[in-house]
Structure formats: C-alpha cells, structure tokens
Image: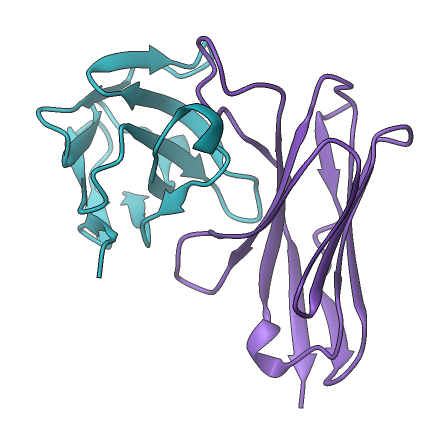
Chain colours: A purple, B cyan
Amino acid sequence: QKEVEQDPGPLSVPEGAIVSLNCTYSNSAFQYFMWYRQYSRKGPELLMYTYSSGNKEDGRFTAQVDKSSKYISLFIRDSQPSDSATYLCAMSNSFYGGSQGNLIFGKGTKLSVKP
Amino acid sequence: DAMVIQNPRYQVTQFGKPVTLSCSQTLNHNVMYWYQQKSSQAPKLLFHYYDKDFNNEADTPDNFQSRRPNTSFCFLDIRSPGLGDAAMYLCATSRGGTSSYEQYFGPGTRLTVT
C-alpha cells in the first residue's frame, strides 16, 4: 500500500460547481497536510496547509483533515476555469531533525473546469 | 519578484552522457530541494540541502549528485543518465524548520534521454 493515495482523475466539472478532491494515507504519524496546485508546465505552488485534524477555509477553498479515517479533502466552491490545474496533496510527520520538511506527495488529480 | 529559477527548461542528453541541471533562488531560503517527477507520478524527493548540510534520501540512486556552492545556487548532476531518468526535475526552496511545509517550486527542467 502506497503511503499516499490520490485519484488521478481527470475530473471535469462545469463552471460554478463544487469540487471535492481527496487523498487517503496510511502513515498515522503524518501531522502536516498540504494541498499544492500545479498548472501545466509550472512547478507546484502551495494552496492550503493544515496541522493535525480539522477544517481550514481560505476564500473559495476549504481543506479538511480526518485523522481517524486517514482522509483529507479539498473543496473548491464556485469553481472557475482558472482553477483548471493538477491538485497534489502532500503530507509530512515532522519538520525537525533530519527530515527538514520531507513531503510525501500524492500523484495529483487533474481538474478541468469548463466555462 | 523573488523566485526560484531553473535552467534549462528543457534538456536533451544522450544515454550515459553526464548532464547538469541548475537552480537558483532569490528568496534567501535556507533549504533547497531536488525532486524527480515522472509523468502522472508524485514528485519524489531526491535530496536536500539545509544551508551546506546535504541530506540524501535512502533510495536516491548513486547516479544522482548535488552541489550547493552558495545560498543562491544548487545543481543536480546526473553522472550517467539512463532512459529511466527521463523526467521533470523540480527544484524547491523553503525557510526550513516549522516553515518547511511551505515550499516554493521552480518551473522544472524536463529531461529527455535519447
């Protein structure tokens, strides 16, 4: 079983739809949960960051972490064509000692928002 | 704008011919990372530098080496590229410590091995 599982999609939705992106993981030591967005031919950029369980909201984006189920989600409300990108989840257990931010990424879900 | 720059954006090399990829940053970050991302795969960390301290991932092949001559620059050397090394190579930086979750990525270098 891979440490982080993410459905690669592609996922196609109409403009204005609510998008739900998900990842599951197996390592119960993960405490830091990130969502990165990667546009075509660009490097990933950090979108959301959550520590431990709970919800975090930033504008149209909401990140949820359920550590009991080892499941994280990213919701995008009122999706726009500019949201079309690949969304990668990433996780880490510690940023101290030798790890210094070793992120374990999912494969990414390719999202297309149609006008 | 502060940023992470990678050169070249596209690199073609022959099987077995050494190649060097370059990364520079204007963010003055302590940590620089190299990731390998194959098509439809997750980025995979190869190694990172915290200042001058080099940290190699256990499963990174010996064929891959890195140098960080100063804070701003970091190089990825592939000594004898094989066909399986064709991938996007991403450089990233962070402040380190509790800010390590926030990594700033360059646009990547796409390596083709013929």
Dividing the image into 4 quarters, which one contains the C terminus of chain B?
A: top left
Answer yes or no: is residue B64 visible. Answer: yes
- Residue furthest out toward the bottom: A115
Q: Is residue A95 left or right of B89 when viewed as pictured?
A: right
Which of the pair A90/A114 is nearer the observer? A90
Residue drawn where x is 71% and y is 25% of the image: A3
> Is A103 placed above or below B52 here?
below
The x and y percentages for residue A105 are: 59, 36
> Is A62 placed above or below B56 here?
below
The quarter of the picture where residue A24 lies is top right
Answer yes or no: is residue B79 visible. Answer: no
Which of the pair A81/B104 is nearer the observer? B104
Instruction: Count up the numbered dots.
Output: 0
Residue drawn where x is 35% and y is 42% of the image: B90
Residue drawn where x is 76% and y is 72% of the image: A77
- Residue furthest out toward the left: B69
Residue drawn where x is 71% and y is 32% of the image: A4
Which of the pair B90/B104 is nearer the observer? B104
The x and y percentages for residue A19 are: 78, 67
> Is B69 placed above or below A109 here?
above
The quarter of the picture where residue B97 lies is top left
The x and y percentages for residue A15 are: 72, 85
Dividing the image into 4 quarters, which one contains the N terminus of chain B?
A: bottom left
> Is A102 placed above or below B40 here?
above
The x and y percentages for residue B69 are: 8, 24
- Residue furthest out toward the right: A69
